[in-house]
Image (cartoon, rainbow, N blue to C red):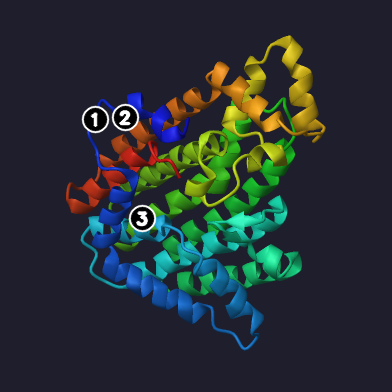
Amino acid sequence: MGLAATTSEITASKKAPDFLGAVATLRALTATGLDGVNQEILACMQSPVAMIPDLAGHLINAGGKRIRPMLTIAAARLFDYDGDHHVKLAAAVELIHGATLLHDDVVDASALRRGAQTANIIWGNKESVLVGDFIFSRAFELMVAAKDLRVLQVLSRASGVIAEGEVLQLTTQKNIAATIDMYLAVVEAKTAALFAAATQSGALIAGCTPAEEDALRGYGRNLGIAYQLIDDALDYDGFESDLGKSIGDDFREGKMTLPLVYAVARAKPSEKPFWRRVISDSCQKDGDLEKACVLMERDDAIADTITCARRYAAHALNDLSKAPENEFSAALADLVETSVSRAF
């Protein structure tokens, strides 16, 4: 059973557009800014070293929903910003995200992203890491071009936190003693930090009040956590054709995501050796993923992960309620509500 079916009872209480519809609405509202973002990114990818635009172009052209730059543009427009620096910031946010994806795929030895071979598989690990560094440098150039020291501080800090999150995840990997707090610390750093910086920087460039800045940062943070929780649930309960990546990657890599944390904590004593073998000892056999999914379903590990995501989504909506009410806030609300019932 896929995640969309699993969450039907949770989402039935309120009629809302589906996730694709919410993304499409937000994309339409931010279309002009997104066109500018694409132009900025294309310009940043230029280099006399042929491999750089080739490898970077493979990542950028592979698709993706562009949620993070849309958040930056929408946050700025939410406060009636009519300049163009928000486009540079949105492009910087997307470049930071792209650079971290290149690094992630090397660290995780991933073979697929968005249904296509990863850059590290095509070009190699060294090449992916170095081009990722190049993309990071271009992102900082765009931040400086926006001419706002506070925004530069927010985005540069987020870049450092993301790197910390990567290291922290390595310390929890294959550790079946990992706790919910340890898992959430990784998510806060690896995912939520950039979501929060995306919305906060958009609000800042628009000249919002300190209270409004806090609200938009909180919205991005809570949306990012909820989004990652659903991603982690989908790794065990999604469909590979929908996700564009292999199901069970987190299981194979021994990542202690929330479904696994719940499952290990709730396992019967006779099942502990199974979890030690497949996670701590990385000794996995045919059928182990299927068995893990059965145990997770029995112990409500997936369902409770989704419930946790819904709580963070509710926090995000509460944060958003402190911002002006207009078409942008309505689209941002739909995005967070539908993000926790998506199947991809």
Where is residue 297 drawn, in percent x and y?
A: 55, 21
- Circle 1: element type: loop
Q: Amino acid at mark 3?
A: Leu
Tell me what residue is drawn at x 70 percent, y 58 percent: 106
The relative height of residue 319 versus residue 134 in the rendered view (above or below) is above
Foreground of the two, 337 or 168: 337
Q: Is residue 214 left or right of residue 141?
A: left
Secondary structure found at label 3: helix
Task: Using the numbered discs, state the Cα–Cα distance from disc 2 to disc 1 in whole angstroms.
Answer: 6 Å
Q: What label sits on residue 194 in the rendered view?
A: none
Q: Earlier in the sequence, mark 3 or mark 1?
A: 1
Proximity of marks 2 and 1: CB atoms separated by less than 8 Å: yes
Give the residue at mark 1: 14
- Can residue 211 be seen here? The reply is no
User: Which residue in the rendered view is the most extreme toward the bottom?
Assistant: 48
Local packing at callout 3 (Cα closer than 10 Å; few below 14, some 14-19, many 20+) is many
Quadrant of the image occupied by residue 55: bottom right
Q: Secondary structure at mark 2?
A: helix
Disc 2 versus disc 3: distance between alpha carbons? Answer: 23 Å
- Residue carrying label 2: 11
Please name whichever residue, 62 or 306, is drawn nearer the observer in this view of the structure: 62
| Residue sitting at x 76%, y 22% | 274
User: Which one is earlier in the sequence, the residue at label 2 or at label 3?
Assistant: 2
Q: Amino acid at mark 2?
A: Thr
Which x, y percent locates residue 311?
40, 28
Relative image position of residue 290 (x, y in whole percent): 64, 29
Residue hosting label 3: 71
Dot 3 and dot 1 residues touching (CB under 8 Å): no
